[in-house]
Image: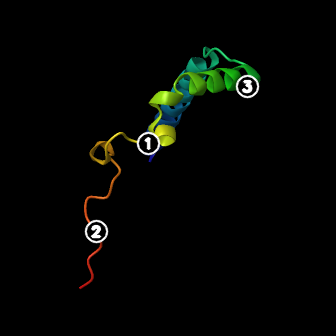
Amino acid sequence: MADMRMNKLQEGLQQQRRLIEQLRCEAQITRMRVSQVIEDIVKYCETHREEDVLITGFNKPQENPFKEKGGCTIL
């Protein structure tokens, strides 16, 4: 019984250590203002508009990886 209690205590401590390590990693992430990030995203989208197949489409239907391979079959 005491062994089970010690195992649970150790598991709890390990879980807390992992959580603390994760929080330390997240605290080191550089934060940016949302307004600045939105501007950067808009600029990126405008710059790469010609390469975006959702806007321009595929040159050839064979290049589309999302095209259905076969049709529907009714038995």
Q: Which residue is at the far front?
A: 59
Disc 2/disc 3 C-alpha distance (Å): 44 Å
Mark toward the start of the polypeptide (2 vs 3):
3
At x 63%, y 21%, the residue is: 43
Query: Residue 14, position in %: x, y?
Result: 48, 30
Q: Which residue is mark 1?
A: 57
Q: Secondary structure at mark 2?
A: loop
Q: Is residue 67 left or right of residue 17?
A: left
The local crowd at label 1, few if under 14, some if 14 to 19, many if 20 or more residues have their Cα within 10 Å, is few
Q: Nearer the viewer, mark 3 or mark 1?
A: 1
Gap in angstroms between the C-alphas marked 3 and 1: 30 Å
In the displayed orientation, state which residue is furthest to the bottom.
75
Residue drawn at 68 percent across, 17 percent down: 31
Pointer 2: what residue? 71
| Disc 2: CA contacts within 10 A as few (<14), some (14-19) or many (>=20) | few
Q: What secondary structure is marked by label 1?
A: loop
Q: Are marks 3 and 1 in contact (CB under 8 Å)?
A: no
Q: Amino acid at mark 2?
A: Gly
Quadrant, the C terminus:
bottom left
Q: For marks 2 and 1, give the CA distance.
A: 22 Å
Q: For the point 26% across and 58% down, which residue is it?
A: 69
Q: Residue at x 47, y 38 (%)?
A: 56
For residue 34, which numbered disc appears in the image?
A: 3
Mark 1 or mark 2, which is nearer the start of the sequence? 1
